[in-house]
Image (tube, rainbow, N blue to C red):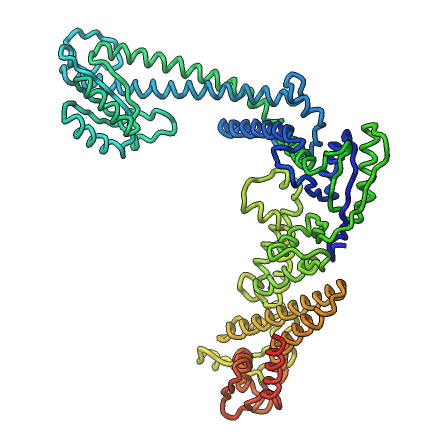
Amino acid sequence: SFLRSDEMIMCEIYIPIEVCYTFISVMGELELLEFLDANEDVIATKREFVNQLKTCSELEQKILNLSKVLKEYKIQVPPYYDNPPVPREKELIEEMNPQRSEFSLLRKLSDEVEEVSANNDQLNANLTSNKEFGQILIRLLKLYYMATGKRHPLFDRAYDEEREIGGGVGMRVFGGIIQRDKMMGMEILLMRLCRGNYILFVDELIEPITSKDDLTKKCIFIIFFQGAKTEQRIIAIAKASKAQIYQAEDNKLKCEALLAKCREYTAQTEKIIATTNKHLKKVLNTAAPKITKWYMQILKMKAVFHALNLIDTSEKIMIAKCWVPKKNIPKIYQVLQQAMEENQSVGSPIIHKIETDEEPPTCIKLNKFTIAFQNIIHAYGIASYQELNPMPYTVITFPFLFAIMFGDSGHGLIMTLFALFMVIFEDSLDRKNIPNEIWQILFNGRYVILLMGIASIYTGSIYNDIFSLGVSTFSSSWKINYNKSTLEENIMLQLNPSKDYKGTPYPFGIDPVWKLAENQIDFLNSFKMKLAIILGVIQMYFGIMLSLLNHLFFKNYNSIYGEFVPQILFFTCLFGYLIFLAFYKWYVYGPNREMIWEPGCAPAILITFINMILVKETETPKGCRSEMYSHQKIIEKVFLLVALVCV
C-alpha cells in the first residue's frame, strides 16, 4: 500500500530473442519492473545493441538540429498531445537502409535542411563581405572626391577623367572593418612597425552590415601606403587585430566600377537568399508537425535498446535480471505470454525468483496528487525498503504547519483560487508544456498549493487575519464601560479584563478588538509562537511513534529499547514539559484571581525553560511566587537529568 513501499523480489525472466524488443517496449510503458545490469563486465562499446543506440542517437541529433533551425526561423511547432507507441524494431533495422525506412522522411528533411542551411550560411557570409567592401568603397570615393575638389556624385555614374590620387606614384590602398575597441591597438602597432609610412583614415559605419550589428561597436579604416614590406606588415597587423581587410583600387573610376558591381551582386544575392529562405521554410513547415512525435519515438526506442543492453545475451535465449514488485508478477507474466503469441514464439513464459541478500529498492506507487508530497519527503531522504512512508501524513501536516506560520485568509484565498485554476485546467496546461522553470515548479506543486491555501484560510479565520485586517463577524466579547466624555478626553484607555470582559469567549478565532490594542503584537505573536511550538512538538512525537511501528515491523526490538524509549523520554522531559508549562500558564494565571496568580506574576515560558536548561534561578517580581507549582525546581532537575541520560 502507499503506507509502505511495495514488497520486492529479484527475478530472472527468460525471454525469446524475437520477443524481447516487444516485451521491453510494453514494460517501459507500464513501468512494472526495474532492470539490473547483467553485463557489468562488458564495456558499453562492446554490448549487443550498441549499433542500434548509435543509430537512435544519430536520429535524435537530426531532430535536435531541426528544432534549432525551427527556432531560428521562428516557426511554431504545433502541440502534440498523443503518446505515440514505441516504433517497431523493424523500423530501426530498415533505418540502416534509408530507402526503405519509415523514418526516411526525417532523414530526407534533415539532410535537406542541413544542405540549404549550409548554402544559406555561405551566401550570407558572401553578402556580408560584399556589403563591407561596398561601405569601404563608398568612404574611399568620398576621399577621392574631396582630394580632387569635385562634387560628390556618389550614386551616379558620371565619368571623371581627372587624375586620381596616387595615379602615378604606385600607391596601394587597403580598407577594412574592425571592432572599435581594437582600433587604438591597431593604430599603435601600425605606428611602431610601419614607422609612419602610410596614411590612415578612420570613419563610422554608414549602416549596419547585418541586423545584429551595432554601429557604435565597429568602424571603417582605409590605409594608403607604398612598398611590399609595408603591405605584409599591414596584413599581419590586421589579422592580429581580427580586422576584415580588403584590397581597394587607387583609381576613382575603378572604385566606381567596383561599387556598381558590389551593389549588383548584393541585389542578386539577397534575391537568392530570399528564394532559399522561402524553400527552407517550406521544408521546415513540413517537419514542424511531426518533429515532436519523432522525438518522443526516438527517445522511447533509445530507452528500449538501453534496457536490452542490460540483458544477458550470451545464451540462445535472453535472460533479464530485475527487481519486481510482488504484486506485478501476474501482469508481467501476462504481458510476456501475449508478446510470445504475437510473435508466434514457441514455449511458455518463465519467471524465476532469485534468493539474494541485496537490499531491494524502495518502490512507491504515486499519482499526480501524491507525487509532489513524495518529492518533499525525498528532498530530505528516501525511506529504506518497506519503511513506513511519511508521505500520507505529510499531505495533512505540511500544508497545515505552513498555514500556522502563514495564517492569512485573504492571501490563502488567492493561493486557493490560483491552485484551483491549475487543477481544473491541468490537462490543457500540461499539454502546453510551458518551458518556464518557475511555472513548472508551481504547476507540479498545484495540489500542495491548493491544500496550503485552504489551510491558510482556516488558520487565518482563527487569527482573524484577512490581508492583515481584522473582521468583526460576531459581536465582541469585550464591552466599553466608559462614558462619552471620558472617551473624548483621553487618547488611550485600557480595558480591564475583570470588568470589561463579558465572560464568554469570542465564538470563533481571535476577538477583532485585539486589532485596536496597543499590545496586539505581543499578544498575537505569543499566541502564534506557542501554537506553532505545540503543533510542531506533536508532529515530532508522531514521527517517533512511526519509528516504533518500523521497529515492530522489522522485529528490531533492540532499537525499541536503545532508540525509541530514549527518544520519547528525551522529548517528554524537555519539549513535552515545555508544552505543559504553556497550558498550565494559560489555565492558572488570569484576571479575577489572587495576587500571586494575576497576569503580572505570570513568568515567561521561554525564560523559564532556558533557566531550567542552565539550572539557573528565575527572577520573580515582588509579591509573586518563585515557582509556578510546588516542587517545580526539583521536578525540572529530574527531567533535565533524565534527558541527559537519554542522550
- Find residue 93 and report its horizontal and vertical position in percent: 68, 24
Mark yes or no: residue 482 visible: no
Front-lying residue, 621 or 200: 200
**Which corner quadrant holds the N terminus?**
bottom right
Q: Is residue 385 left or right of residue 637?
A: right
On screen, residue 476 above or below 590: above
- Measured from the top left, where is residue 259 in percent x and y? 28, 13
Q: Where residue 258 appears, x then y in whole percent?
A: 28, 12
Q: Which residue is drawn at 15% across and 14% down?
A: 166
Vertical comparison of 408 with 91: above or below: below
Residue at 79% x, 32% y is: 16
Asked where in the image residue 263 lies, by quadrant, the reply is top left
Q: Is residue 454 above or below residue 253?
A: below
Quadrant of the rendered structure where residue 168 is? top left
- Looking at the image, residue 54 lies above or below residue 556: above
Q: Quadrant of the C terminus?
A: bottom right
- Find the residue positioned furthest to the right: 347
